[in-house]
Amino acid sequence: MNLTEHYNQLYKSSSEGILNENYNLDFKINDVSDSRFGITLLLRPSEKIKTEIQFFLKELKSAEPFQYYYPDSDIHITVMSIISCYEGFSLEKINVEDYAKVIKKSMEDLGEIKIDFRGVTASNSAVMIQGFPSDETLNILRNKLRENFRNSTLEQSIDSRYPIAAAHSTVMRFTEKLQNPEKLIQVTDQFRDYNFGGFKAEKLELVFNDWYLREKSTNLLYNFVL
């Protein structure tokens, strides 16, 4: 996948939709009865990059103060959604050590994962930071995870929603009607090519999580040092 082209096309179509009030609101993010849970393998950017992201979010908040903004603790890149969130899933249904073994096998002889955060893009319901891996290491890991989990008997739903290929980080979600979509797009336009910085992932985290990977609903199951 050409990530630059992918992000550009996504931004073009989504920004046009936002300006035409053709976007989706997330009504479940504040629903305390939301019981969708799953397990995810993820990585997190450096603290320096999070500081840059919060600078961007401060500008977004000036345009749209009543939307949902990710705190530092929740900012992440999904490596693989191993069990996509669904109602009724609990840790009692799985043996975490079995999942860790498959992940460790997939990480054998894995090189460094380096990612540059450059620019922003959007969907019809969210704003994201664009992530660009420095090489194919992340894709290699994802393909090994696909193969090894599918060859196991473990519960998994890899790629059930869509085949993951990008390396973005969602940082804002639309939860209420936009008050000033024009100003919102003005801000995102200003940050389209902003350099948030690069980082080398030091570890991967296997977590039990809700749909939004909020810290209060996320349990760390396993750390994998890179």
Image (spheres, rainbow, N blue to C red):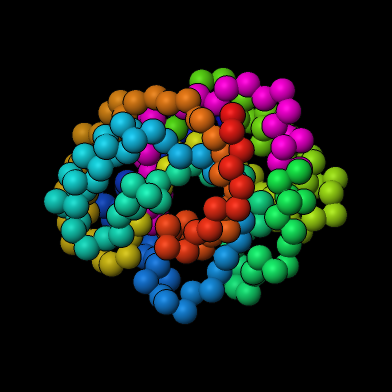
Total numbered circles:
0
Residue 111 inside the magenta-drawn segment: yes
Q: Quadrant of residue 215?
A: bottom left
Q: Quadrant of the C terminus?
A: top right
Q: Does residue 27 show up?
A: no
Which residue appears farthest toward the left when viewing the image? 62
Q: Between 18 and 170, which is closer to the camera in this rendering?
A: 170
Find residue 177 and report its horizontal and vertical position in percent.
Answer: 26, 66
Task: Identify which residue is drawn at 61% across, 68% down.
Answer: 86
Q: Between 197 and 63, which is closer to the camera in this rendering?
A: 197
Q: Is 192 situated above or below 157?
A: above
Which residue appears farthest toward the bottom when viewing the image? 33
Task: Identify which residue is drawn at 61% across, 38% down.
Answer: 224
> Is residue 55 toward the left or the right of residue 37 in the image?
left
Q: Does residue 169 show up?
A: yes
Q: Quadrant of the N terminus?
A: top right
> Is residue 115 toward the left or the right of residue 56 in the image?
right
Find residue 52 and report its horizontal and vertical position in percent.
Answer: 26, 34
Q: Quadrant of residue 47?
A: top left
Task: Identify which residue is drawn at 46% across, 39% down.
Answer: 44
> Is residue 201 toward the left or the right of residue 81 in the image?
left
Task: Identify which residue is drawn at 63% across, 21% down.
Answer: 111
Q: Quadrant of residue 124?
A: bottom left
Find residue 82 and report its horizontal and vertical position in percent.
Answer: 66, 51
| Range covered by the magenta-colored residues | 102-129
Find residue 157 and report its horizontal and vertical position in percent.
Answer: 70, 56
Residue 146 inside the magenta-drawn segment: no
> Is residue 140 toward the left or the right of residue 15 in the image?
right
Q: Between 10 and 163, which is closer to the camera in this rendering?
A: 163
